[in-house]
Image (cartoon, rainbow, N blue to C red):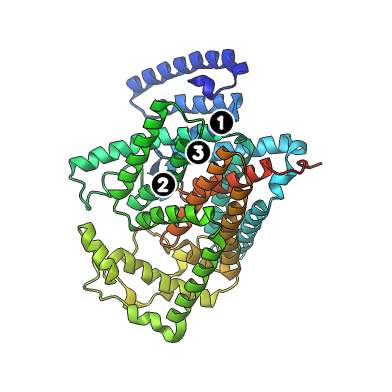
Amino acid sequence: MLDAFFPKHLDKTYTAFFYLLAIVFFMAEVGYVLENRLLFLSIPFVVLVIGVFILDIKVVYYLLWATIPISIQYSFQNGLSTDLPTEPLIALLMFGLITMGIKHFRSVRADYLLHPISIFLILHFLWIGLTALVAENFVIAIKFLLAKTWYIVTFYMGSLYLLRSLKDYKRLVITILVPLTFIVSVILVKHAIMGFTFMSANYVINPFFRNHVDYASLLVVFIPFVWYYYKLPQTTNFYIKAALVYSFLILIAGIFFSYTRAAFVSLGLIVAAYYLIKYRWMKYALVLTLILSTLWISSLIKNNRYLKYAPNFEQTVAHKDFESLLSATYKLRDISTMERVYRWVAGFRMIRDHPWMGFGPNGFYPNYRPYTIRAFETYVSDNPEKSGIHNYYLMTTVEQGILGLIIFLVMSLFVLIYGERLYHSIREYGYKLLVMAALMSHVAILSILLINDMIETVKVGPVFFLNLAIIVGVDIRFRNTKPSRVS
C-alpha cells in the first residue's frame, strides 16, 4: 500500500520514521492519560507532518487533499475560526512550495507561468492586491489576499508541480474519494435513522460541513472525477470498478438527500457540459448565456423594476419539507432565496457608489447595511452569522469593482473555451477523460457560484484551482514545442 505513495529509495528511511512515530504515539497516549490534555494527542500529528514533509513534499500534498472531506471548522474565543487540520496543512505546504521554488528557481518551468490561464490568474491576484490597498477596511482586505495567496500557491502551483502523470491524478482521486465516500456513508446512515427528513439535513452533516450547501457542493464538483477514474482503460479490476460504482451512487444519494437546489441544477449542467464540449458547442452556449443574463439584469435595473419583486415579510418564511421549499421558491416566498435577493439589491446599489475599485476584498459585510432596502427584508436579515452576498460574481464586483469581475469572468470562461479545444486536440484517451472531468467540474463550480460564495471555502475552493491546473498541466504536456526555462 505504501509503495503506491512513497518512493522506493526511501523505504529504509520510512521504516525508521514509522518506528519513531510509533514511539511518539505511545508517549502521547501516556501523556494524555496522565494529564487529560488534548494537546498531547496533537503531538503525533505534528511529528507526522514534519517528518513526511522533510522526506517527500508530495506525501503532504496528498495528505492535505485527504483531509478536505473530513476537515472541521474550529472557532477560537476571539471570534476567529479555522478548518482543522486542513488550513494548517495548506499553510505548511505553501511554505514548503515557496521554499522549493526559491531554492530551485533556475529549474522553474517558464511555460507554466506564461500559460494564458496562469497569466489570467496572476492578473486576477494582482488586481485583488491593488483593491486591497485602497479598501475601506485594509486589515480584512489583506486577510482575504493572504487566503487567496495560499489557495493559488498550494492548489494551483502545487498541483502543476506535483501532478505530472495519469498515475498521479489517479492517486489524487483515490486519496480524496476514500474519505469522502466514508464520510458520506456515515452521514447517510445518520440521516436514515432520522427518516431522511428535510429538517435534519443540516444536522446530520455536522461536524464536517458548515451547512448542506457546502456538503452537496463538494459532492457535485467531485462527481466528474469518479466518472473519470471509472472510464479509464487502465481501470480493469472488477473490485475497483465495483467500489467506484458504489462511491458514485453514494455521492449521488448524498446530493439527493442534501435537498440542495443548486446541487441539483449543477448535476444537470454537468451532463449538459459533457455534450456541449463533445460537440464543440461550448462557446455558443456561453455567448447565449451572457446575452440572456445581460438582458435579464438590464430589465430589472431599468426604472427600478426589481422593486416589484419585494417579498411579503409575513409570508416569506423557512419551510419544513422540500416540496414546500420548491413551491415557495417559485412563488418568491422562500426565506433563503429572498434573503439572497435582499443582499443582491444592496450589492447592486453598492456598485453604483464604487464601480471601478469596489469596497475592497471582504468589504461586502462591513458596508452593505446602508445600501439595503427595507421592502426586501426577511426574518433573517439581521445576519448574525455575518455571511456574504451569496453570489460570487456580484460579490467580486462589489469588492473588486467592474474590472475585477471582468478579469474573473473572462478567466473562468476562457478555461472552458480553451479546455474544449484542448479536449479535441488530445489523442491519448486517459488525458482526454481527465480534461473532460476537469471541465465538467469547473462548470459545476461556476453554476454554484451564482447563489453561493465558494472559491475561498476549504471544501470547493481547492477543486476550482485543481481544475485550472489540470487544463494547464495537460496542455503543456502535449505541446509540440520544447519547454523553456527561467534563466
Vertical comparison of 477 with 409: above or below: above
Label 3 crowding class (10 Å Cα cut-off): few <14, some 14-19, many 20+?
few
Asked whether, in this view, residue 246 is left or right of residue 146, the answer is left
**In front here: 236 or 302?**
236
Kindly identify which residue carries mark 3: 88
Could you tell me residue 356's position as x and y percent?
60, 72
Q: Residue at x 57, y 62 (%)?
A: 283
Q: Residue 167 bears which disc, if any?
A: 1
As drawn, the residue found furthest toward the bottom would be 303
SS state under label 2: helix
Residue depicted at x 39% and y 44%: 73
Please give the residue where the numbered disc 2 appears in the rendered image.
Answer: 218
Q: Residue at x 44, y 53 (%)?
A: 270
Could you say whether the residue bearing mark 1 is in a helix, strand or loop?
Answer: helix
Q: In this view, does 378 lie above or below 281?
A: below
Instruction: Decide which of tag 1 and tag 2 comes sooner along the chain.
Output: 1
Circles 3 and 2: CB atoms closer than 8 Å: no
The amino acid beneath tag 1 is Lys
Q: Hey, what amino acid is under mark 2?
A: Leu
Up-down relation of residue 26 to residue 177 (above or below): above
Q: Determine crowd level at label 2: few under 14, some 14-19, many 20+ residues with C-alpha closer than 10 A.
A: many
